Image (tube, grey):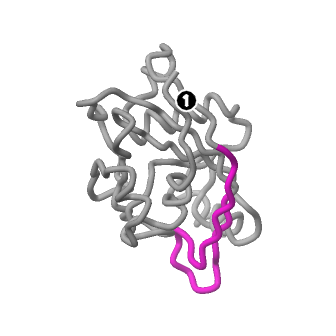
């Protein structure tokens, strides 16, 4: 086991076997970013990875152990969208959307019987018309701007992402 741990890929400060054990045994805390363009469209990515593989989903990521929430928000915005610097400079202002629970029957590992439970801190990021993220992560095979009403109704959009769009989103500051 020691050799496996030494050579296993590291997933957010944890080696793969340890992270699998954590996912199987406890909830993860994460942040989702609901990127809204011109108060009319939401950016969704077509998920390459489990859970939610094959669905359109908002960008997001988990908070690491000993990482402050603001630092996690900036890291996730950078990793997922290339917007970390814009957040740090205050050019994009995150607005609190709420806390959510996401339960999946599967996990990143694809191992039978390993489910995933997320406690999600969701934020809205308003951007102007014509905005395109400077980059995107490898967890999504495609990006698409969806009209808000269409995304809220589409079965192609994961129900957890649709949940963010069913109520009133905060207005831009």
Where is residue 152 shown, x and y percent of the image?
Answer: 44, 59
Judge by depth and name the residue closer to the eye, 4 or 51: 51
Where is residue 24 shown, x and y percent of the image?
Answer: 70, 72
Residue placed farthest to the left in the image? 130
Indicate whether 77 appears above or below 58.
Answer: above
Q: Is residue 110 magenta?
A: yes
Where the N terminus falls, by quadrant? bottom right
List the residue tagged with mark 1: 94
Indicate whether 73 appears above or below 24.
Answer: above
State the image quarter where residue 78 is shown: top left
> Who's the residue at 29% across and 48% down the image?
145
Q: Secondary structure at mark 1?
A: strand
State the image quarter where residue 94 is shown: top right
> Who's the residue at 38% across and 67% down the image?
154
Indicate whether 100 appears above or below 134.
Answer: below
For this view, does 17 lie left or right of residue 155? right
Where is residue 75 shown, x and y percent of the image?
Answer: 52, 33
For this view, does 153 lie left or right of residue 17? left
In magenta, the rendered stretch is 98-118
> Who's the residue at 54% across and 47% down the image?
32
Where is residue 29 shown, x and y percent of the image?
Answer: 69, 51
Indicate whether 28 appears above or below 97.
Answer: below
């Amino acid at each position: 086991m020691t050799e496996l741990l030494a050579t296993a890929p590291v997933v957010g400060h944890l080696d793969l076997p340890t992270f699998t054990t954590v996912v199987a045994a406890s909830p993860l805390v994460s942040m989702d970013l609901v990127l809204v363009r011109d108060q009319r469209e939401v950016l969704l990515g077509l998920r390459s990875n489990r859970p939610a593989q094959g669905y359109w989903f908002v960008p997001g990521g988990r908070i690491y152990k000993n990482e402050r929430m603001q630092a996690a928000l900036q890291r996730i915005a950078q990793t997922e969208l290339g917007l970390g610097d814009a957040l740090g400079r205050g050019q994009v202002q995150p607005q609190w959307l709420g806390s959510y629970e996401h339960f999946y029957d599967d996990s990143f590992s694809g191992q039978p019987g390993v489910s995933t439970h997320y406690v999600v801190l969701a934020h809205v990021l308003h951007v102007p018309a014509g905005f395109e993220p400077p980059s995107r992560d490898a967890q999504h095979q495609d990006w698409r701007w969806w009209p808000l009403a269409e995304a809220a109704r589409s079965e192609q959009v994961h129900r957890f992402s649709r949940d963010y769009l069913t109520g009133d989103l905060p207005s831009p500051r």
